[in-house]
Amino acid sequence: MTTIQKKPRIGQVNPIAHLTTEDLELIAKELDDIRQSVIDTRGERDARYIRRVIKTQRSLELGSRVVLLASLFPPAWLVGTAGLSAAKILENMEIGHNILHGQWDWMRDPKIHSTTWEWDSATPADQWKHAHNELHHNFTNVIGKDNDLGYGIMRVDEDQPWHPMHLGQPLWNFVNALFFEYGIAAYDLELRGAVARGRTKDPKFKAEFKAVRAKIRRQVTKDYVVHPALSMVTGSFLSTMLANFTANTVRNLWSHSVIMCGHFPEGVQTFEKRSIDGETKPEWYVRQMLGSANISGSKLMHIMTGNLSHQIEHHLFPDLPSNRYSEIAPKVRDLFDRYGLDYCARPFPQQVYSAWHKVVRLSLPNGWLDQTTARTLPSQLKRLYQMSTGGPKVRRALQARMAQEQRRAVAA
Amino acid sequence: MLGRMSTTLAPTTRWRTRALKIAEAATTPLVPGDFLDLFAPLRPGAELRGRVESVHPETADAATLVIRPGADWSGHVPGQYVRIGVDVDGVRCWRAYSLTHGPRADGRISITVKAVPDGHVSPYLVRHTRPGTLLHLEQAAGEFVLPVSGPRKLLFITAGSGITPVIGMLRNLYPSTDSGVLRLARSTPYDVVVLHVAPSEPDSIFLGDLRKLEAAGAIRLVARYDDEHGVLDLADLDALVPDLAERTTFACGPGGLLDAITGHHEERGLPLFTEQFRVTTLVAGEGGTVTFDRAGVDVECDGGRPILEQAEEAGVLMPSGCRMGICYQCVLPMREGVVRDLRTGELTTAVPGETGSGGIRIQTCINAAAGPCHLDH
């Protein structure tokens, strides 16, 4: 992947070069109309929807926790863990994420409001809202501005110079997936940057750090102390602890996968930092259109992903009720088609594979994976070893040679 | 889970507190009540709610709702009103309605609602409320109540749905039963005249009640219908109620009528109590003074730019985020006022008494003032 602004330089097509300023304005007008059509019809049906989801989630969580009181008994462990995993996924995705976006603020229900909601996650809602709603949704896929691209721990673009450290990124990414909620908390806190820049004594950082610590303590006490202790009546302390750990891990893996599918699969575009200086609303819209990817699938898939399976629609209209994304998706897709834009939507396994493939590809020097076949493997490994152990000069030289070979291969 | 623990651990308050702490630790980031609400929304300790038990049509456009209030309802006196939060088209709206019965033996409360033409909440309550609906309640409030001691010669002037608090007081004084109107000893000192004003006769809710009370000799009823007698002229008041000067007047109805009666009674030095439901009428304009109540700052805002921008220019410390209506970091509660969404032109109005207790939360980065506004910040 290369930012769309740099694509023509390496012989690729800038996917929005064919759009005129008038086209952009017409696209924006149509998108505004779609948004308005939802706002005009927002009402009782939508309110019933979110209340039903919340009620279902709470019943499922309560039921699963009650079953887990006897988790020593294997069928109870299985049923309870499965139920709790599903409840935790619903709570974070379709409920928490979307309420914190202000999607349900229009109901004026103080209990279902972006300013009052707190979610079952290590990161406090306030800090997440800043990092996610304010930074990620605003600077979507702008290299150097949108830290959601690789969470600052991964190489996400061919333009970033390769370093031997990047060989480990498939592993980091997997570890990040396993403990995703803590990764998010650290990321919302900008922990790495704070440590690197010695900002840890800063009062604002200290206050935020304290808030995260308190939140984590409450979360950990709930799942690993209180509920296991309640299960002691049946001798199920450890098995309930394990069940809760499993449910948290299942949710971590699931939400990490869904979120990777949103901006990481092949076909999603990235943008130059400079390109958003003085960006107009129509340009912003088009960046959101091309910077996101959807997951096609069943109704259940949409609900369990918190409708982030409609990532494109969500990024265009982050504050519209999530149950409406599937309804406006055909109109949005039609707009893409009419203006010759690529609506990136694939089933879940394909998007996950595509995203992981990219993580692996970028963990290696540019072009390395493409040029490696069974026949070239020994020489490629040797080259990789040289690049990993040599200095920047060696890396630049070998990288240039690989680029040259690739150009020749394409020409031939 | 909470229920089980609190029954086994209940003997002392200390244990109860401890059990509550454990329940809180088990349900965080929610609270135990969020789970209990699934089963018992009217339990003690819950947010105050009420369940509609029955809906009785009174006239073509008015209905009485009998409501079972939550366990923490602390009762009311006749003539008080209750604020009710109801979800109309999915949006929580708050309105005040007079309680139409005195305290009832079965603990139920009732309100009588007249569907206001072009109204938002009242037509919904009259036509779309079904038994079983949960409403949000606040405790009864209101100073417009029957004097327990003091004047006994009373004149009630009621217009339209302004009859409802008065009916509450009268039903309490003279309970209506299957065997007729009861004349209780405590009610004998009262001498009541009711002057009821309505556009036309069939529109007059509770007319049946008033007529029954008059037939039983409990009150004297003077009914004036605009289409029959012409619009009420206060100059005729002395003719309609010859002993006006001896009476204490309770007036309940729309603002215009109350203003007129206030003027009339002040001039004559007559005692008067008034009650009005809708106090404020807000009309959207262009721009206005935005008052930040806690900061104690007034900012003159024009109608073409977001409140956020202009407040910052005036030196108010404002929360903000994306500044384009996406991130909801700039949301502040508006207690009173009208704002216009600069993207869509949509108006958001906060009328005191018709919002939740915190006001209506608005995004300051995409809303411009459309009149004077009070923000809780």
Image (tube, coloured by chain):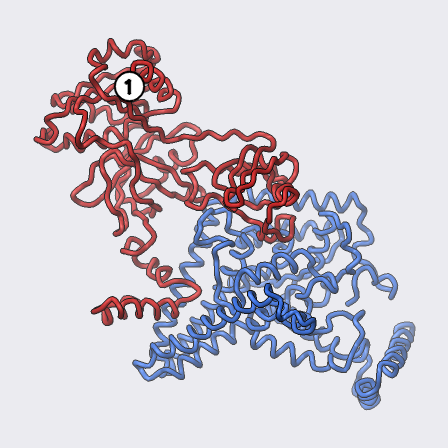
Residue B205 at x, y percent in the picture: 27, 26
Side (left or right) of B160 relative to A118: left
**Quarter of the figure with residue A149:** bottom right
Tell me, what hue is chain A?
blue
Q: Name the element at disc 1.
A: helix
Q: Which residue is mark 1?
A: B201
In-front residue for pair A20/B316: B316
Q: Which chain is assigned red?
A: B
* Subunit ID for the residue under disc 1: B
Residue B237 at x, y percent in the picture: 27, 12
Residue A308 showing in the rendered view: yes
**Quarter of the figure with residue A76:** bottom left
In-front residue for pair B20/A315: B20
Side (left or right) of B192 relative to A248: left
Residue B309 at x, y percent in the picture: 65, 44
Q: Within 10 Å of the Cα at label 1, are there few (<14), some (14-19), or many (20+) other Cα atoms? A: some
